[in-house]
Image (cartoon, coloured by chain):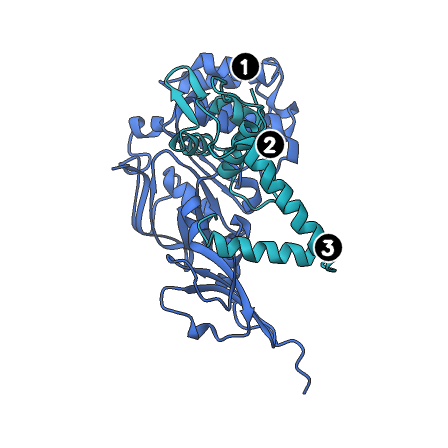
Chain colours: A cyan, B blue
Amino acid sequence: MIEFQLDETSGVATYLQLVQQVRQALRMGMLEPGDQLPTAQQVVAKLAINPNTVHKAYRELERDGLVRARPGLGTFVTRSPSGTDPATQARFLAAMTDWLRSARAAGLGPDDIEAIYRTAFRDCFTEGAA
Amino acid sequence: MVSAVIETSGLGKAYRRTWALRDCTLAIPEGHVVGLVGPNGAGKTTLLSLAVGLLAPTCGTIEVLGEHPAVGPAQLAQVGFVAQDPPVYARMTVADHLRLGAWLNPGWDGELARQRTGQLGLDPRQRAGSLSGGQRAQLALILALAKRPGLLILDEPVASLDPLARREFLRGLMEAVAERGLSVVLSSHLVGDLERVCDYLIVLVASRVRVAGEVSALLASHRRLSGPRRDPATLPAGQEVIEESHTDKQTVLLIRTGEPVHDPAWTVTPVSLEDLVLAYMSQANGTRARRPQLGVVS
């Protein structure tokens, strides 16, 4: 069972924070198919948030096929997120690290690099994420 | 179709010649936790008092759960109300309050009342006057929940509580929502108090409703734009300016729009609920007028 945390300064909607934490836990192997997510009741009791927010997060995960709600029993993980083949991830991590090193060697500071990354990211995934 | 828990049309309340609430037209759908936010004196207590039938409208109409407020015992039994300053009797014990609640309310859930008092560690023999502020608020909440209302209305329930008691109170309230799916309307002059719990928001300023809607829809339809200085009158139709500020070089706007913003001159960022509420409040206060321009030497 995982425990949710909230970052109130992140500006990310609460339900999205829950969705992201489940995805993250799946990627890192903290959650596996068959595992149960905390019930809305449990999440509400810990975080003092609106239960509808929890339902909304779980519905989104269910739409993505990652979890399934079993009436009267709870919500269970059905599979891990696709496209998370570890070899592919490692390849892109290595490429990104190389790129960062060369940017730094060319004299770019962390702020410059972040600005470039953000611009490229936005061009690639225009809007939609908010 | 989801039915409305509170529906008003042209609702107004005047004290002598002063309007405490004006032109209020709302339809709050069922199953939400509704935050009623606005500065002190905006009309929040007036609206809530109209909803529970403690006040009668000067003009317009209000229906609560499909009926006139306080029209009869059946309607009253459906609505729970916790007034500002937790309404408990200082000389009565916790157990006395529960007995009184059981005696006054036909649908009283004694099991729920006992269970919640136990969970909170409230001593049944203690007088309400010697409870802490947080405990008094919790006792008032227990009384309101144990009558098993379909709609629970709370006026500034956490204003007088310290941060820990505030969190505990909202936790208790949200657990009740999770258990029984009741609709809740609660007011506060601070949106930060309500940000975690509300999924529907009404901003009330200077006796008028400025904006109302589901929080997710409100956040999706408001954006902050920053870019080179520009006259907001040149914005495309459909982008309504809620707040603007300018320097000699730069313009920052908070806009409401149904469409994505494509103009590459703008840096577009999402807004927080607090930014959104503050923008509507300052708009109403008339501080939207352009600030003196900085950096201009004459």
Label 2 to label 3, Cα distance in Å?
Answer: 34 Å
Q: Residue at x 43, y 63 (%)?
A: B262
**Quadrant assignment for the N terminus of chain B:** top left
Instruction: Look at mark 2 in the image and give the residue it sits on.
Output: A5
Q: Amino acid at mark 2?
A: Gln
Q: Nearer the viewer, mark 1 or mark 3?
A: 3
Q: Nearer the viewer, residue B218 or B204?
A: B218
Asked where in the image residue A29 lies, by quadrant, the reply is top right
- Is the residue under label 3 in contact with that under label 1 (CB below 8 Å)? no
Q: Amino acid at mark 1?
A: Ala
Q: Nearer the viewer, residue B117 or B252?
A: B252
Label 2 to label 1, Cα distance in Å?
Answer: 37 Å
| Chain label for disc 2 | A
Q: Amino acid at mark 3?
A: Arg
| Chain label for disc 1 | B
How many numbered markers are drawn? 3
Instruction: Look at mark 1 in the image and give the residue it sits on.
Output: B95
| Chain label for disc 3 | A
Residue B10, numbered label? none
The spot of residue A130 in percent (x, y) is 48, 48
Q: Is residue B140 left or right of residue B212?
A: right
Compared to residue B166, the image places residue A71 above or below, namely above
Is residue B174 at all visible to an observer of this figure? Answer: yes
The answer to whether tags 2 and 1 share a subunit is no
Q: Is residue B113 left or right of residue A102?
A: left
Of marks 2 and 3, which one's residue comes earlier in the chain?
2
Instruction: Look at mark 3 in the image and give the residue it sits on.
Output: A104
The spot of residue B235 in percent (x, y) is 42, 70
Disc 3, SS: helix
